Image (cartoon, rainbow, N blue to C red):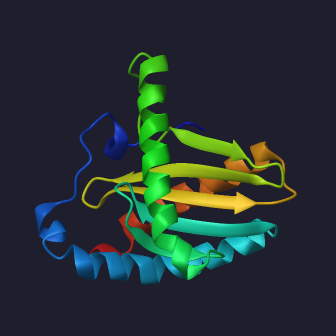
Amino acid sequence: MNEQHSDDQHMEVRIAPEIAEHWDIWSKVIGRTALPRLEALRETIPTMTSAILCTADGMNLCAIGIEQDNVGRLAALNSSLFAIAASEAEIVSDGTASPQSTMVHMSTGQGHIVLASLVLSDLGQFLLAISAKDIPLGMLVVQTRQAAEDIRTWLKEKSVLG
């Protein structure tokens, strides 16, 4: 279940130069094509309150259930939160944690938030955060991990990548 991918094995995560050169276009394509996948999560997580896909450096790609004024701020916060958690995971795991296997979980008293990473060798690292109410944390962790893997696989396999 904790399958490792060649894209995430303790490598420096960076975007391919030909993609980075046109990132403004690529980010819009990724966001527009990933948005329906986020919306479809409501079928598997009916109590989902929000979902956001952003880059690891805090640039929003697409979001649902978040006020527009808060989308950029949340993307930046997710970037910072994940960076801190990944650094701690690296330390406590004696260097065996990878970006793909590190997840962040928070409980708010009214629900949970799970933040997962997905890495693609040419596109870099993305973060998927899902919040939901009235769901056990473990179930949201499993659903978020599966959604992140589905999006990663989908981005890797589809013509979205050119």
Of all residues, the one furthest to the right in this rendering is: 134
Q: In this view, does 134 lie to the left or right of 147?
A: right
Residues 54 and 67: in front is 67
- Which of the 4 image quadrants contains residue 29? bottom left
Image location of residue 91, percent across then percent down: 43, 20
Q: How many labels does the image show?
A: 0
Residue 4 seen anywhere in this rendered image of the structure? no
Tell me the quarter of the image containing the N terminus: top right
Q: Quadrant of residue 153?
A: bottom left
User: Residue drawn at (38%, 21%), measured in percent from left and top?
Assistant: 95
Q: Up-down: is 70 above or below 120?
A: below
Q: Residue 46 is drawn in which quadrant? A: bottom right
Q: Is residue 37 above or below residue 47?
A: below
Residue 81 image offset from top left, x and y in percent: 49, 45
Q: Residue at x 87, y 57 (%)?
A: 134
In the image shown, does 3 or 132 lie closer to the viewer? Answer: 132
* Quadrant, the C terminus: bottom left
Residue 17 pos. (x, y %): 12, 63
On screen, residue 52 versus residue 31, left or right, reads right
What is the residue that sits farthest to the top in this orientation?
94
Residue lying at 77% horizontally and 49% vertically, measured from the top left: 139
* Residue at the spot 47% in from the left edge and 27% down from the top edge: 88
Rendering coords of residue 57 (x, y %): 34, 56
Lateral position of residue 16 relative to residue 11, left or right: left
Any part of residue 35 in sight: yes
